Image: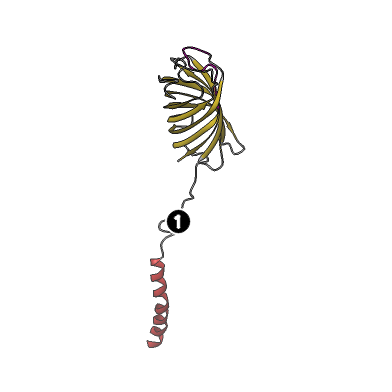
Amino acid sequence: MQKVLAPLALCAAFLLPAMAGAQDTPSAGSNAMKDRPAVTFNEVERGVYFGVYGGPSWITNPPADSGPRPFSSGQMAQVELGVDLGERLSLGVFFMGSANRAGAEYVGYSQGAASGDFTMLVPGAVLRARLVGFADSQEVKRTWIYARAGVGYAMFSPKKLLPDSDILVFAGPGVEYYTRLRHFSVGLEVVGNYLASKGAFGFAVAPNIRYAF
């Protein structure tokens, strides 16, 4: 009897730990370790953005109540903060400054008490509509043709030359390219400007860069 039980006890000594280990092993279908999901990024980031514009500007007939209104060239710079409303629309606020050169014959509204160059500061709001997009080799629309329009409150300096503020409206087309850096886009636009109450026309060429958060 002992000769029969001895092999059985020896087999049990080997089989029991193996069975216990098999029960503790999680099933492959339910509790097995899973790979972490791959992190994906948008090829083009959209959302809250910050933009910077700058370039040459011109006023064809600077505001004046008397005397010559000579063609005036200058420089403009603008910062913009806004939000993308989907793929095609953006809404923002801006602050623009410009400096224009004018000869000594330009006296504005000063009745001859002042003459020469003047500056303009304009806070306002702007809307951008992306009209046509062009996809690259990866089917990502990186290049867009857009239209941009805005309105602002123009304040002039020196006050003796141009004492009254005005409403500035502007609009124009542009082209924008979303770089492979995801957050950055660069563009170029041409806009026409109009000072509503003074009847002064102008235009500007504005390279720009935007960063979307």
- Does the image show residue 89? no
Residue positioned 44% across, 20% down in the render: 162
Q: Quadrant of residue 164?
A: top left
Q: What amino acid type is highlighted by mark number 1?
A: Lys
Is residue 96 shown left or right of residue 137?
left
For the residue pair 184 and 96, the one nearer the viewer reads as: 96
Is residue 133 shown left or right of residue 213?
right
- The residue at which mark 1 appears reads as 34
For the residue pair 61 and 46, the one nearer the viewer reads as: 61
For the residue pair 72 and 36, the one nearer the viewer reads as: 72
Q: Quadrant of residue 177?
A: top right
* Residue at the bottom extreme of this rendering: 2
Q: For residue 33: magenta?
A: no
Look at the picture and state if 20 lies above or below 143: below
* Residue at the top extreme of this rendering: 66
- Residue 179 pos. (x, y %): 56, 39
- Residue 83 pos. (x, y %): 43, 33
Q: Which residues are magenta?
A: 56-67
Report the quarter where the C terminus lies.
Answer: top left
Residue positioned 50% across, 35% down in the render: 52
- Residue 113 pos. (x, y %): 45, 18
For the residue pair 138 and 182, the one nearer the viewer reads as: 182
